[in-house]
Image (cartoon, rainbow, N blue to C red):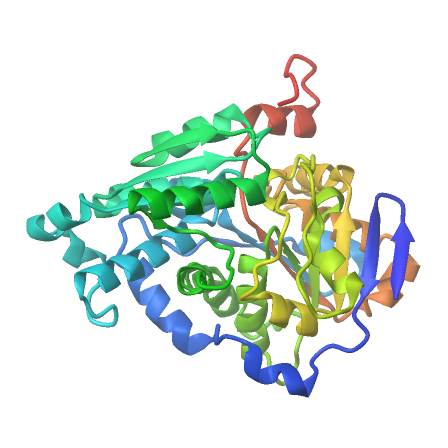
Amino acid sequence: MEYWFKDFRILQNEKPFPANKAKRYPSFDKTVAADVIRFHKSLPGYAPAPLAALQEQASAFGIKGIYCKDESHRFGLNAFKGLGGSYAMFRILCEKLGLDYKTVDYRYFQKDEVRKQCAKIHFVTATDGNHGKGVSWAAKLFGCSATVFMPKGSVEARRVAIEEAGNATAEITEYNYDQAVEHSWNLARKNDWILIQDTAWDGYEQYPEWIIDGYLTLAAEAAEQLGNMIPTHVFLQAGVGAMAGGVLEFLLSCYRDKPPVMTIVEPTEAACIYLSAKCGDGRCHSIDGNPVTIMAGLNCGTPCRITWPAIRDKTTFFCACDDIITEEGMRAYANPIGSDKAVLAGESGAVTYGLVNRILQDKTLRNLFRINADSVVLLVNTEGDTDPEGYQRIVYGNPHVKSS
């Protein structure tokens, strides 16, 4: 069933959790997360990203709680993507150097002889910003190098941030996101580089799966920080759906007895997961052309085939939102009510909060999403002000700041 509202639309999955699909899902659970967290804890600067409790806002809306896992604090990168990039790079290097990933961690890669080997390895990736920044940062950690390609329309500040974060060169291309991925893949094969990408296709699935594994740290931290507070509703933003699918699977495995209502949120102009779900044939479908949205990190054309089956079958609602929704979310995070703490949320980080605020103010939508006084909402702020000028313009209405 599809519902249209001002500035967004909703597709309800009326038959989630089909039993005959269960064997297709990768394991993104506590066992996998334990290995990932062990590695991340060995990295310099590791600390759990905070879980912000927006309790006064929740009380104002008449629900039990709103919690935001705030990834703008992660590793000083202003985004969550370093989790996936660093873990995948670790697993790839272990594979190349013949190491057991269960017995070594980042400290092993501080040895001179190991770093000399790593210095010969070059990675390549395509990104709208945050993933490339995470790869650049990880390359510097391990003593490798990287090349990063960005799609047409990418913000220059994000390109500069990629190069400043670590050991990569970054270039804004004339390609859309999917074309930039294909370009990176072609260069990897031509130059004997290693593609480290969070989307997948036939013959390229293991490395994306390791990236998704890396995202489990944020989900595991959130579950621990919530303690006995069980989320009833989880809203996850998606580009290709790598983070969303991994976190969805992890949380459903944690709360198996009381599974939360899962909602996937995308930009209207790049809603490839929404489109794929609406087509109803079980397959991934792509968005053509060069979609334009301020949610740069979500501006992707094709779902990740690794997480797509779980997203397809276990998501209750798919939502496609216009840019105004994330702008409202950015301002709401920056201007909390009462004693709630402000959250620095960029364009790709705030769309879920903007949508939740719209839902909680509408009786029809509350009923549709089965939200009541006992509801607990969990959100993930995936990035801070990765486009500083855009953030200032949207949140504070600075007339002297030009749109990027």
The image quadrant that residue 277 belongs to is: bottom right
Q: Nearer the viewer, residue 27 or 261?
A: 27
Eyeballing the image, is 165 above or below 60? above
Classify 53 as above or below 339: below
Location of residue 79 in the rendering, given as x and y in whole percent from the top left corner: 48, 44
Across and down, in percent, residue 360 comes to 82, 56
Q: Quadrant of the C terminus?
A: top right
Depicted 151 relative to depicted 242: above or below: above
What residue is rendered at 25% in x and 45% in y?
141
In the picture, residue 84 is in which quadrant? bottom left
Q: Residue at x 71, y 50 (%)?
A: 271
**Residue 316 percent across, percent down from the top left:** 75, 69
Residue 127 visible to the viewer = no
Which of the two residues, 137 or 74, is positioned nearer the viewer here?
137
Instruction: Residue 131: tell me if it is visible.
Output: yes
- Answer with left or right where residue 178 lies relative to residue 36: right
Residue pushed farthest top?
400
